[in-house]
Structures are given as structure tokens and as C-alpha cells.
Image (spheres, rainbow, N blue to C red):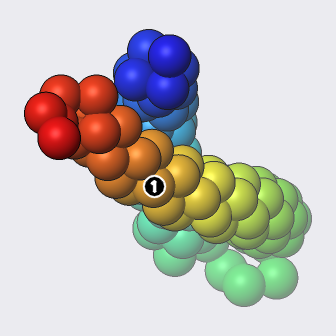
Amino acid sequence: MGVITDSIRMQYLNNLKLDLEYKIQLVTQARMGLSQSASDLMQVGTDYSPDSPVVKQLNQRQAKLKVLEQKLEQQMIQYQARLQMVSTELESCRSRLNQNIGRAFSYN
């Protein structure tokens, strides 16, 4: 019975691992897009004088982008921590499954 339970658990953990890896990829892409947007804002701002209202507005938008980027960074850290826990549990489950298979098919 342990073999079936461990097999089901491993399938669940594999699916969870793939889901977390996909979410990490999405966050990484979003962060890259934000970085590009912030860079574009700075390039536009160089065309105006530093005291211009347009430059002030661009700086405010850049600050908002930085806050959003920090939130994405925190989300990335959470996903990576969960991925590490799932990977550890997956290895433990794999080890247990191998032990159960060994016991189930030993002819002593």
C-alpha cells in the first residue's frame, strides 16, 4: 500500500514543482519587462531639463516601477523557498518509494 501512496504523492509533488517553476519563469519575465520599462523612462527623461514637470512625472513612474519590481522579487523568493521545500519532499518520497519497492519484492 505504501508504494501506491508514495507514487501518488510523487506525482502530486512533481506537478507542484512544475507549477512553481512556471511561476518563477513568469515572475522573471515580468521583472525583465519592468527593468526595460524603467530604462526606457530614464532615456526619455534625458531629453528634458531636470526641473521639467515631465521629468518629475517620469521619476514618479520609475519609483512605482521599482516598488513593483521589489514586490515581484519578494514573490520570487517565496516561490523559490517553496520550490526548495517541494524538491526536498520529492527526494524524501522517492527514497521511501525505493525502500518500499525493495521490501515488496525481496524474497527472504
Q: Nearer the viewer, residue 38 or 34?
A: 34
Q: Residue furthest left?
A: 107
The residue located at (40%, 23%) in the rendering is: 3
Say above or below: 27 vs 41. Answer: above
The residue depicted at 28 percent of the width and 28 percent of the height is 104
Q: Residue at x 45, y 37 (%)?
A: 17
Instruction: Estimate the x, y position of residue 10 in percent, counting from the top left.
Output: 42, 29
The reply to whether residue 69 is visible in this rendering is no
Q: Quadrant of the C terminus?
A: top left
* Closest to the observer, 10 or 104: 104
Mark 1 secondary-structure assignment:
helix
User: Badge 1 is on which residue?
Assistant: 92
* Res 93 visible: yes
Residue 107 appears left or right of 16: left
Question: Where in the figure is residue 90, as x and y percent of width and height?
Answer: 44, 46
Q: Quadrant of residue 81?
A: bottom right
Please tell me how many numbered marks the rendered image carries: 1
Which residue ends up furthest to the front in the rendered image? Answer: 108
Closer to the camera in the image, 46 or 1 = 1
| Depicted 96 relative to depicted 36: above or below | above
- Determine crowd level at label 1: few under 14, some 14-19, many 20+ residues with C-alpha closer than 10 A: some
Q: Is residue 73 left or right of residue 92?
A: right
Picture quarter containing residue 55? bottom right
Residue at image coords 78%, 59%: 71
Q: Position of residue 26 (x, y in %)?
A: 47, 37
In this picture, is 58 found above or below 34?
below
Residue projecting furthest to the bottom: 50
Amino acid tagged 1:
Ser
Q: Identify which residue, 99 or 86, lies in the foreground.
A: 99
